[in-house]
């Protein structure tokens, strides 16, 4: 599945992408996504792909069809609480900090199972897979070990057969790394630059 990563893009660029066949829009920012969504009438899906702050969850659960960036129990509980109010079931992915970078969001690979076990019974959350960014490299081949490591966690969780957990989606790979990510098992890629051109600062 192709997710168009649309941060910094105008509503016109996004509509052009939709008319070109894009079905899933990925946004990093809740407020910007709300503004753009208000101008898009096509039946596309909206994915939150940026770090989600708890004070934005209330708005986020009204806008998004999937949250790809769950990385803590507190965030998961807030998503569950706000979804409960709307009587909504939210598909989510767990964001993995596959590079173990101290300045990055996401849960460490060795802590993913524990996080899932703590949130899998939240009734308004449907855990459907994993997402990772991985460290940024000039040479995408260097990203391969991080994609492999995330895939390994994905397979490990599948084998555990935890009730209510589906390991369907493995979201990894961006413009410069998507081919490597797909080779390593990604079935969801998030592409910005390759669709829209270089981002304006
Ligand atoms: C910006 C972004 C992308 C896409 O990056 P490109 O290199 O422009 O393809 C993918 N995922 C996330 C989370 C992003 O913020």
Image (spheres, rainbow, N blue to C red):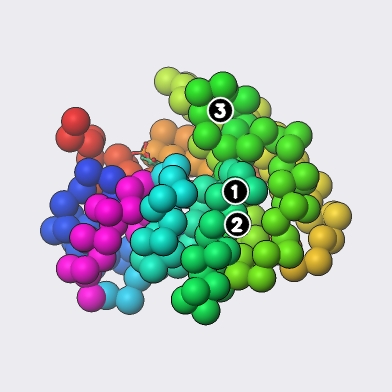
Q: Mark 1 or mark 3: which is in front?
A: 1
Residue 143 numbered mark, or none: 3
- Of tags 2 and 3, the one toward the viewer is 2
Q: Marks 2 and 3, Cα distance to the nearest angstrom?
A: 32 Å
Cβ–Cβ under 8 Å for marks 2 and 3: no
| Mark 3: few/some/many CA within 10 Å (<14, 14-19, 20+) | many
> Which numbered disc flags the more N-terminal residue, 1 or 3?
1
Q: Does mark 1's beta carbon lie closer than 8 Å to ligand 1? A: no
User: For the residue labelled by badge 1, is the local secondary structure a helix, a strand or a loop?
Assistant: helix
Horizontal and vertical percent position of residue 64: 41, 64
Q: In the figure, 169 relative to 186: above or below?
A: below
Q: Which residue is mark 2?
A: 77
**Mark drawn on residue 74:** 1
- Contact between labelled residues 1 and 2, with CB atoms less than 8 Å apart: yes
Q: Is residue 40 visible?
A: yes
* Label 2 SS: helix
- Mark positioned earlier in the residue sequence (2 or 3): 2
Residue 68 included in the magenta stretch of the image: no
Q: Is residue 196 left or right of residue 81?
A: left
- Magenta-tinted stretch: 25-41
Element on which disc 3 rests: helix
Instruction: Tell me the quarter of the picture where residue 89 sits.
Output: bottom right
The residue that appears at 49% across and 62% down in the rendered structure is: 66
The count of marks equals 3
What distance separates the C-alpha of mark 1 from that of mark 3? 29 Å
Q: Determine if residue 190 is in view.
A: no
Residue 146 sits in quarter: top right
């Amino acid at each position: 599945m192709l997710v168009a990563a649309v941060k910094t893009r105008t509503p016109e660029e996004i509509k052009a992408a939709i008319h070109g066949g894009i079905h899933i829009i990925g946004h990093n920012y809740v407020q910007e996504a709300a503004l753009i969504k208000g101008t898009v009438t096509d039946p596309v899906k909206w994915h939150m792909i940026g770090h989600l702050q708890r004070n934005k969850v209330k708005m986020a659960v009204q806008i998004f069809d999937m949250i790809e960036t769950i990385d803590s129990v507190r965030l998961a509980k807030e998503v569950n609480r706000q979804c409960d109010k709307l009587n909504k079931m939210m598909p989510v992915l767990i964001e993995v900090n596959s590079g173990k970078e101290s300045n990055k969001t996401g849960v460490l690979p060795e802590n993913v199972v524990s996080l899932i076990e703590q949130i899998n019974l939240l009734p308004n959350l449907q855990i459907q897979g994993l997402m990772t960014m991985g460290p940024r490299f000039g040479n995408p081949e260097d990203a391969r070990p991080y994609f492999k490591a995330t895939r390994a966690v994905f397979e490990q969780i599948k084998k555990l057969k935890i009730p209510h957990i589906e390991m369907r989606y493995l979201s990894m790979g961006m413009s410069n790394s998507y081919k490597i990510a797909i080779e390593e098992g990604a079935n969801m890629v998030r592409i910005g630059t390759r669709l829209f051109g270089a981002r304006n600062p």
